[in-house]
Image (cartoon, rainbow, N blue to C red):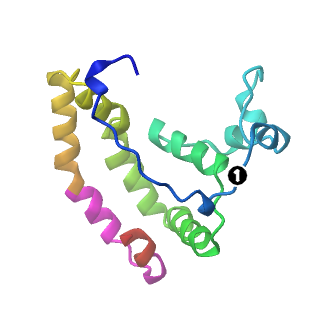
Amino acid sequence: MSDSSNFGQYQLYQHDLSQYMKLDASALKALNLMPGPKDGSKTMSLYGLLDHCKTPVGSRLLAQWLKQPLMSLEEIERRQQLVEAFVTDTELRQTMQEEHLRSIPDLYRLAKKFQRKMANLEDVVRAYQVAIRVPGFIGTLEGVMDEQYKDPLDA
């Protein structure tokens, strides 16, 4: 709010919250979904148990999915198909982890640097490295043979 370079950079839009279950802080605590600030061990929550993500972006997405569960059966099933595709197809999972995700920086933070005009040459190189890896990333997803996973992966 105090950074004047942010003025005019953002716009408001309506977000349909009816697609997510509303969980307040007491529900999150009662369901033990997220580690609390005083919890010594991070694995004593569902998030800590499930978080085997290879990137910070993946960890943030998992936290968002746990804090805002979907309400639509179709969306839940589509998400389950995506997860199932990576669980059952070991080659796809390993290729994505070893060849693609390992070399991709945290795009959210990188985009914030560019937006604030704080990016340096190293950040430009990182963005370029992501851009040249996109065709291989897409090619790996298109190479999935199982037809039941084609539609969710394409989406």
Q: Which sits in the foreground, 25 or 130?
A: 25
Check the image and name the residue furthest to the top.
2
Residue 16 shows in the view: yes
Q: Nearer the viewer, residue 15 or 130?
A: 15
* Residue appearing at x 32%, y 48% in the figure: 100
The quadrant of the picture occupied by the C terminus is: bottom left
8 relative position to 20: left or right: left
Q: Is residue 139 magenta?
A: yes
Dot 1: what SS?
loop
Q: What's under tag 1, amino acid-wise?
A: Lys
Q: Position of residue 37 (x, y in %)?
A: 72, 22
Q: Which portion, as a residue range, is magenta?
A: 135-149
**Can you say whether 107 is above or below 138 in the image?**
above
Q: Position of residue 115 (x, y in %)?
A: 25, 31
For the N terminus, the quadrant is: top left
Residue 30, compared with residue 118, is above or below; it is below
Give the quadrant of residue 135: bottom left
Residue labelled with disc 1: 22
Q: Residue at x 31, y 70 (%)?
A: 142
